[in-house]
Amino acid sequence: MNDMFAHENGFETVFRDSKDGLAILKDDMFVDCNQSMLDIVGASTREQFVGFTPFDFSPELQPDGRRSDEKGMEMIKQCLDTGSVRFEWVHKKLNGNEFWAEVIITKMVLNNEVVLHTNWRDITEKKTLELETQVQKETFETLFNESEDGLCLLTTERYFDCNKAFVSLFGASRKTEIVGITPIDLSPKYQPDGRLSAEKAVEIINTAFTQGTIRFEWVHKKFDGTEFWCEIILFKITIKDTEVLYAITRDISEKKALQLEIAEQKSTLETLFNKSKDGLSIIADGVFSDCNDSFLTLFGFSKKEEVIGLNPLEVSSEFQGEGGEPSVTAAEKRMSDAFIQGSTRFEWLHRRQDGTDFWGEVILTKVTIKDSDVLYGITRDISEKRKLEIEVFERNIELKASNDNLEKSIDNLKETQAKLVESEKMASLGSLVAGVAHEINTPVGIGLTGVTQWIDQCNVLNKRYQDGSLTEADFEEFINDAREISNIVHKNLERTAHLVRSFKQVAVDQTSEEDRQVNLKHYFEEVVFSLASVLRKSNAQVTIECPDDFIILTNPGLLSQVLTNLIVNSVTHGFSDRQSGQIKMVITEVTKTEFRIDYQDDGKGISKEHVPKIFDPFFTTKRGTGGTGLGLNIVYNIITNVLGGSIVCHSTEGQGAQFIIQFSVSDRIN
């Protein structure tokens, strides 16, 4: 049989010595092969190969699901038709192990007979690598397309691919809106540091290509023009022999807003500390660790280094006043009270560097700095106050000696009246403070509980990480819990912030005498919001009807006082012994700088004989339960004397009360 096919020495040599497995196929059966073919299929003799078909060395099915004999006959037919065919095939060794091969079948004539020359080359390693590469490619594409972060690929000139998250991040509807544009097209003209976005972007991209990677924060711009903060990581990668940048973009607007808010608060606190006219200091471990310039001036020091490390006793008199308590025992008690109670206020006899003593009012408050409890001290020189107190005391003795009882009685009456009016104002503010404190307590408590739980879960996660028991499921659970907790904390802190903003504005206005610009409707709504706890006690509802464009220049604190007193009056008198109540206010324009308020409640009303007296000072029907009779008197004085207006009350017992108020403002803002 060998002689039939080995008539040419050259072919015989190539056939026998080739590293590829070579065989002759005739009538669908192998009739000859070389040693490499035997090695490939794991045969030790030619008899284990010759006389068999290609399908004896193939699994029943090929990877595409087709039968090996059916698909193989198609390849043979194609070879007979075209002369040669190359393809990849899964073969099977004699021991049953499958392997990938690159097969070339060539039609040829030997001894006047058509035969097929087959060439097998084991490509298992190559194919395994190709399959692994394909899996990696599919994995990368899945991660790329399904990532929650915005992912994109770009050159130095433009974006050429991105995922769904990136499209959504910028408010686009499809990828084609992104591909082809540049990062500058999605950025404002300037970055927050004042640099041109175009100039800074080129510098960052060049750095990424040079160093291989870079992480930075950037302000991007959505398609609708909205700007937002991002954290971006750029990686240099190679795709088809070309270096490009792979970018990970994450929206950090909330995080950045919080950072900026904290930085602003820190800056504000540092400014308040350094610029305060009071002497401010920090006491840690029993000695001063910091102070402001006013403290240095107050005690006669020239620089802060002279104070840091001093014990407070070193700037104190030996005794607290003539025959007073020793400073060493008094100081220990005051600081202990501050740590236990959180804060304490007292008067203290200090000693300057030049040896002179002076009285100071001191407030010590326990604060936490870098996880350590320290005392924050406020020191105010009250020497003049003490001197004045002594003078007043001596003067009072003289007045008593002169026995001018009539003048003293008049003075006391005026003083009492003024204090009562001021007390009524402060009582209103105090009620507001108590109400807001009550409202804040719940969301702050929820926020604190959430943060505490989050810290505990962080500790548990860290412990599992340290001892190697952390699983992917644990981490995913932690992420989900953290997201839920952060949402709860954020929601409650937002409510707290709203309450504080409303309280701050209303409280400042009630203690200020300056005019400022306000939106009448919005300001009245803020005042009502700040009185939520007062209204809730009587289940009262307030309705405000006012156009949105009433923007005026006035002293809003006066209007706040009027509105607060009217609402408290309705709750205290009109809705007492009732399950609920309704208050309605209608604000209309009389002239450009004059407005009218129609205030009505559906309370129990005012008796006919009391209506003419309600604006008189000290008139009240609740004197036995704490009423002073100054609430509506203050309203009347503010409206008629300060705001240049008028107020009239209409009421029928059992049918509620109505107040018609007309007042003037400094200006109307268009």
Image: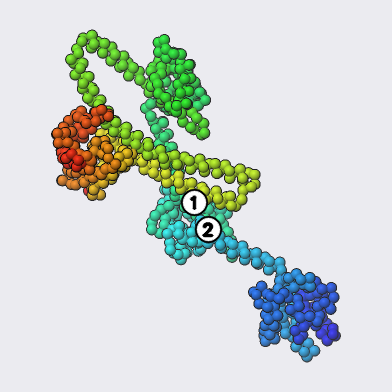
Q: Position of residue 184 (x, y in %)?
A: 44, 57
Tell me the element at label 2: loop
**Residue visible at 28% across and 36% down?**
509
Place residue 594 in its image quadrant: top left
* Residue 480 in sight in this render: yes
Give 631 or 552, whichever is nearer the viewer.
631
Q: Residue furthest top?
A: 401
- Distance of label 1 from label 2 (alpha carbons): 15 Å
Place residue 20 in its image quadrant: bottom right
Can you tell which mark lies on residue 103?
A: none
299 sits to left or right of 120: left
**Residue visible at 23% across and 23% down?**
416
196 sits to left or right of 427: right
Q: Position of residue 157 (x, y in %)?
A: 49, 61
Q: Position of residue 125 (x, y in %)?
A: 71, 66
Give 592 or 193, whichever is nearer the viewer.
592
Give 314 or 144, whichever is nearer the viewer.
144
The colour mode here is rainbow
Q: What crowding class fits label 2: few (fewer than 14 Cα within 10 Å), some (14-19), or many (20 or more)?
A: some
* Residue 306 in sight in this render: no
Q: Position of residue 185 (x, y in %)?
A: 43, 59
Against 582, residue 609 (above or below) is: above
Against 299, residue 600 (above or below) is: below
Q: Amino acid at mark 2?
A: Ser
Q: Pointer 1: what residue?
A: 231
Q: Amino acid at mark 1?
A: Glu
Q: Pointer 2: what residue?
A: 147
**Residue visible at 27% across and 29% down?**
625
Closer to the camera: disc 1 or disc 2? Answer: 2
Numbered circles on residues, count:
2
Q: Earlier in the sequence, mark 1 or mark 2?
A: 2
518 sits to left or right of 175: left
